[in-house]
Amino acid sequence: MEYGSRRPVRTTLLSAVTKIKCLQFAQEHNDWTVKHWEKVMWSDESRFQLHHADGRVRIWQKQHESMHPTCMSTTLQAGGGSVMVWGMFSWHDLGPLICVEQRLNSTTYLSIVAHQVHPIMLMAYLNGDGFFQQDNGACIVQEWFQEHEGDFTLLRWPSQSPDLNPIEHLWDEVKRAIKQLVPQPSNLTELDSAIHQAWCHIPRITFQHLMESMPRRITTVLKAKGGPTKY
């Protein structure tokens, strides 16, 4: 019957409200061309585990061998620690990676916006015609954006919409690069260094191709009525 055993595709759990907001965003930007998306600066944060197990390892064993050392897979609590970074990129270039302690709270994010995002947006979009995409609704940050609304425009962004944000694919690029390292990072300092090196070596053509995919992403979200997509 041509059925095959496959693992299910992992997607973000979307509420009905989130789907509506994603659909509305796609409808509002359905006429945007690649030239429009070239004006957008994308941002997001991501956490990288020092020791990551994807749960896909399989072994052959006899019934009584389950507790044999060769049939076990050891784990570390919380993956042995992690590094969290915040990054940004546009059609023109990759922005800096900022290491974030523990979690990205409103105070830390406000500092990033004021001292990293603002000057970069002013340099990248001299006419003030740039858009900044962010997924942070803290009131103190919103007030800052209102005070500087003449410098660039804050893109109205639906929360919990990774299918629409191309930076998610850049995080995947970084994770793949780290996974190929021999030897693997053995501590958080080495992991942090590996993350930054992998980020800096992402080719320009890679993130520009992601920007070029935005019209297709919008079309796909419209077809999915705001639900999960292949992206």
Image (tube, rainbow, N blue to C red):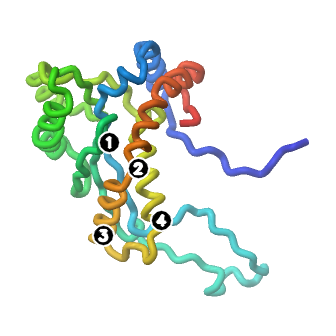
Give the CA separation, mark 2 to mark 3. 17 Å
Residue 227 in the image: x percent, y percent?
55, 27
- Label 4 Cα neighbours within 10 Å, binned few <14 / some 14-19 / many ≥20: few
Three-letter amino acid code at the position of disc 4: Lys
The residue that mark 1 highlights is 44
The residue that mark 4 highlights is 179
Relative to 201, does residue 187 appear above or below in the rendering? below
Relative to 71, does residue 18 appear above or below in the rendering? above
Q: Of callouts 4 and 1, which one flags the residue occurring earlier in the amino acid sequence?
A: 1
The residue located at (70%, 74%) in the rendering is: 59
The residue that mark 2 highlights is 171
SS under mark 2? helix
Residue 200 occupies which quadrant of the picture? Answer: bottom left
Relative to 169, does residue 223 appear above or below in the rendering? above
Residue 29 in the image: x percent, y percent?
41, 16
Identify the disc placed on residue 188. 3
Three-letter amino acid code at the position of disc 2: Trp
The residue located at (33%, 34%) in the rendering is: 91
Give the CA separation, mark 1 to mark 3. 21 Å
Q: Of callouts 1 and 2, which one flags the residue occurring earlier in the amino acid sequence?
A: 1
Q: Quadrant of the N terminus?
A: top right
- Label 2 Cα neighbours within 10 Å, binned few <14 / some 14-19 / many ≥20: many
SS under mark 4? helix
Report the front residue among 78 and 213: 213
